[in-house]
Amino acid sequence: PVGSDAGLGEAVAAQAVAAVPQAAAAVAQEAGLDPNGPEMAALLKLSQDVVERIVWEVVPDLAETIIRENLDKLTAQRQ
């Protein structure tokens, strides 16, 4: 159902966006930037937007592919 796909997309997007701050902090530390500075705040916001947009583009197609593969397996098992 469409609602399930939306829920999956929201869950994956939330997990991906939640991982951005930790990754950004590691990059900031390696680059010698202040993790609490304005540059990092701007980078973090941009990164979260990009990650969320990519997740919304990828997850629905991936979910459809997985569902179709499982349906094909189940159909083959019944025959």
Image (cartoon, rainbow, N blue to C red):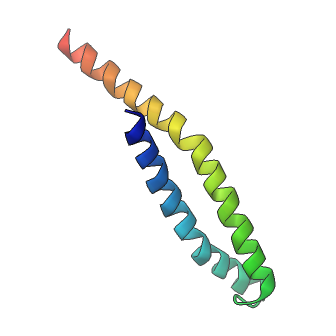
Give me the residue at 45% from left, 37% from top: 63
Outermost front residue: 3
Q: Quadrant of residue 31?
A: bottom right
As rendered, which of 30 and 35 lies closer to the eye?
35
The quadrant in which residue 57 appears is top right
> As displayed, is residue 78 above or below residue 69?
above
Q: Is residue 52 left or right of residue 76?
A: right
Q: Which residue is pictured at 75% across the width and 91% down the height?
A: 34
Quadrant containing the C terminus in the rendered view: top left
- Tell which residue pokes out farthest to the right in this image: 39
Pick the residue in front: 34 or 41.
41
What residue is drawn where x is 42% and y is 47%? 8
Q: Position of residue 23 (x, y in %)?
A: 62, 73
Residue at point 60% right, 70% down? 20
User: Percent from the top left, x then y, of residue 16?
Assistant: 54, 61
For the N terminus, the quadrant is top left
Q: How many marks?
A: 0
Quick check: 36 above or below 19? below
Left/right placement of residue 74 relative to residue 20 reads left
In the rendered image, the vertical position of residue 62 relative to residue 52, given as above or below: above
| 65 displayed left or right of 30 | left
Residue at far top of view: 79
In x, y percent, where is residue 53?
65, 51
Vertical side of 33 occupied by 44: above or below: above
- In the rendered image, residue 30, in percent from the top left (x then y), is placed at 72, 83
